[in-house]
């Protein structure tokens, strides 16, 4: 707003200078980011904007606006669903080779040339679309990157037998993730797996850590990142889980009402993320309540028998597994003793976004993408130039 316009508005509205400035600031910060452009696999440029300290902690550069206010829904903005095709190249339906009754569902954007594949696993009650916006931001900064965002069993569009007992044991979910990766390789006719960076949020963090620790991915695994889950705080939080579930609505009158609830309750603090991910969390069912037919797809209360299995021993496994390690948190108070000691010893990289909620990657997709891309680049083996072997030099007749 120009000085002339500002002076006219003050006189017209009869506001004092301080009150007017506050109103102007509120209006300016109530804007939403633009939607991402459709993905394009043919470009190859990349950029980096973060630096690394001697202990492996990622230090944001000033232009990343670390303390910028998270975006919420602006007045008069739409709550319409954003389709998955805005962010991904294709969706995959993959039949399990172990149990043909299980059909995995995932979203894929293929890597270009020798680009990495970010394999992303969501948390309990969520879906692969929780990574949609951050996936788009990753490809803006690393256009050769591929993204594989999975729906784990009992979530999203992955199909399991209706009469089968719910099996969400950590070992089962870890084996499922490995199967999805291998089935994707087979479906896409890749000769070999691309360099892989595993990324998991909450429950997904426990799953990717468990898979990394098994060593099944071999040298294809470059690194793994865990988003806002720490063993000690996760186990403590389980005690209040039933209280949280009792405060959630049982259903919503419309899909837009479900999106709006997630934004207003600050469960997801970015309206673009909410418009993308929330529709996959709900299913239309008029039989239970015709006034609120949009019901939760996943019954979180039914997962209680598996809660401790997911998180007990997580810190130890996170530190012991091979590969680069990144822990991305919404607050340092979440660190337990084992991880605090590990961080002091430089065993993993730590990034903290105190202005985010639990869904860090949805609240702050740009900053999360910057961190993940920088994390990949620091673990990228293709950039390494190794010295020649002594035996090779001797064969060449060179003195050593």
Image (spheres, rainbow, N blue to C red):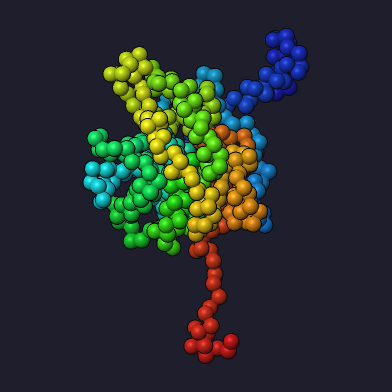
- Measuring 50% from the left and 63% from the top, which residue is drawn there? 382
Q: How far from the left and from the top, in percent, is residue 366? A: 55, 40
Reply above or below: 281 against 102. Answer: above
Q: From where the camera sits, is residue 255 visible?
A: yes
Which of the two residues, 194 or 289, is positioned nearer the viewer here? 289
Q: Is residue 366 rendered to the left or right of residue 43?
A: right
Q: Is residue 3 rendered to the left or right of residue 311?
A: right
Which of the two residues, 139 or 264, is positioned nearer the viewer here? 264
- Measuring 34% from the left and 19% from the top, which residue is drawn there? 293
Q: Residue furthest right?
A: 17
Q: How far from the left and from the top, in percent, is residue 364? A: 55, 37
Reply above or below: 219 against 152. Answer: below
- Measuring 25% from the left and 51% from the top, which residue is drawn there? 97
Q: Is residue 323 rendered to the left or right of residue 174?
A: right
- Measuring 49% from the left and 57% from the top, which residue is drawn there? 321
Which of the two residues, 121 or 249, is positioned nearer the viewer here? 249
Quarter of the rendering occupied by the C terminus: bottom right
């Amino acid at each position: 707003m120009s000085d002339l316009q500002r002076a006219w508005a003050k006189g017209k509205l009869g506001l004092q200078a301080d009150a007017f400035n506050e109103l102007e600031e509120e209006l300016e910060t109530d804007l939403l980011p633009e939607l991402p452009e459709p993905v394009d696999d043919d470009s190859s440029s990349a950029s980096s904007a973060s630096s690394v300290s001697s202990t492996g902690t990622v230090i944001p550069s000033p232009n990343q606006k670390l303390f910028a206010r998270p975006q919420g829904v602006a007045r008069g903005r739409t709550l319409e669903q954003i389709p998955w095709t805005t962010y991904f190249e294709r969706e995959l339906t993959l039949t399990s080779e172990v149990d043909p009754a299980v059909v995995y569902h995932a979203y894929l954007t293929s890597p270009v040339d020798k680009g990495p594949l970010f394999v992303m696993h969501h948390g309990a009650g969520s879906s692969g679309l929780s990574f949609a916006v951050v996936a788009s931001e990753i490809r803006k900064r690393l256009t050769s990157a591929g993204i594989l965002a999975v729906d784990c069993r009992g979530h999203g569009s992955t199909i399991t037998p209706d009469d089968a007992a719910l099996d969400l044991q950590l070992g089962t979910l870890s084996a499922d993730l490995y199967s999805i990766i291998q089935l994707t390789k087979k479906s896409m006719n890749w000769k070999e797996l691309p360099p892989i960076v595993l990324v998991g949020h909450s429950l997904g963090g426990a799953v990717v850590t468990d898979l990394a620790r098994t060593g099944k991915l071999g040298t294809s695994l470059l690194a793994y990142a865990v988003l806002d889950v720490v063993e000690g705080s996760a186990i403590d939080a389980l005690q209040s889980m039933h209280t949280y579930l009792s405060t959630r609505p049982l259903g919503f009158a419309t899909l837009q009402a479900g999106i709006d609830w997630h934004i207003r309750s600050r469960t997801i603090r970015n309206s673009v993320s909410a418009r993308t991910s929330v529709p996959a969390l709900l299913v239309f069912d008029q039989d239970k309540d015709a006034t609120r037919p949009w019901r939760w797809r996943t019954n979180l209360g039914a997962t209680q028998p598996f809660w401790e299995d997911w998180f007990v021993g997580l810190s130890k496994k996170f530190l012991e597994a091979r590969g680069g390690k990144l822990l991305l948190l919404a607050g340092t108070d979440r660190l337990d003793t084992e991880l605090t000691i590990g961080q002091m010893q430089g065993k993993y990289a730590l990034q903290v976004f105190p202005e985010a909620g639990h869904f860090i990657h949805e609240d702050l997709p740009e900053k999360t993408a910057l961190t993940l891309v920088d994390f990949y680049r620091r673990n990228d083996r293709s950039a390494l130039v190794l010295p020649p072997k002594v035996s090779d030099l001797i064969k060449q007749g060179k003195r050593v």
